[in-house]
Image (spheres, rainbow, N blue to C red):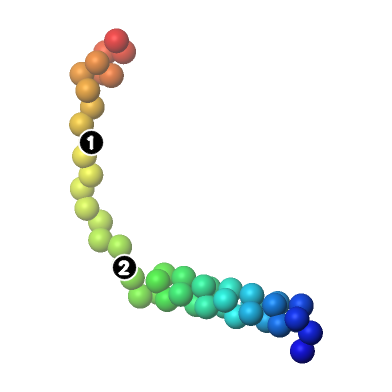
């Protein structure tokens, strides 16, 4: 097997593993919604 073909085969296998991992995350992991708050300095509200 020429080295270039072997290289492409390894890249294709790695890409398939990454794609499969992303698909598994999308399918099996459900995000938990939660409330978010952030403090704002008083100077930012008045524009000073």
Residue 23 seen in the figure: no
User: What is the residue that sits farthest to the right in this orientation?
Assistant: 2
Q: From the image, which quarter does the N terminus lie in?
A: bottom right
Seen as rendered, the residue at the extreme bottom is 1
* Residue 20 picture location, percent across and down: 50, 77
Front-most of 34 and 21? 21
Query: Which residue in the rendered view is the most extreme toward the front?
Result: 3
Where does residue 24 sit, x and y in percent of width and height?
Answer: 42, 76
Q: In the picture provided, is 19 more to the left or to the right than 8?
A: left
Q: Is residue 43 above or below residue 8?
A: above
Horizontal and vertical percent for residue 13? Answer: 60, 80
Disc 2: CA contacts within 10 A as few (<14), some (14-19) or many (>=20): few
Query: How far across and how far down the image is residue 28, in percent?
Result: 35, 75
* Residue depicted at x 41% and y 70%: 26
Quarter holding residue 37: top left
Residue that carries the numbered disc 2 in the rendered image: 30
Q: Residue furthest top?
A: 48
Mark 1 or mark 2, which is nearer to you?
1
Q: Which residue is drawn at 26% across and 13% down?
A: 46
Q: In this view, does 45 lie above or below 25?
A: above
Closer to us: 14 or 38:
14
Q: Mark 1 points at which residue?
A: 38
Using residue 20 as the reference point, say whether residue 1 is left or right of it.
Answer: right
The answer to whether residue 44 shows anywhere in this view is yes
Q: Tell which circle, 1 or 2, labels the residue nearer the N-terminal end.
A: 2
Residue at image position (71%, 82%) is: 6
Instruction: Give the residue drawn at x 26%, y 18%.
Output: 45
Q: What element carries label 1?
A: loop
Q: Which numbered marker is on residue 4?
A: none
């Amino acid at each position: 097997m020429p080295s270039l073909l072997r290289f492409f085969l390894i890249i294709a296998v790695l890409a398939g593993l990454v794609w499969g991992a992303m698909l598994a995350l999308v399918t099996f992991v459900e995000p938990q919604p939660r409330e978010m708050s952030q403090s704002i300095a008083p100077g930012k509200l008045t524009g000073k």
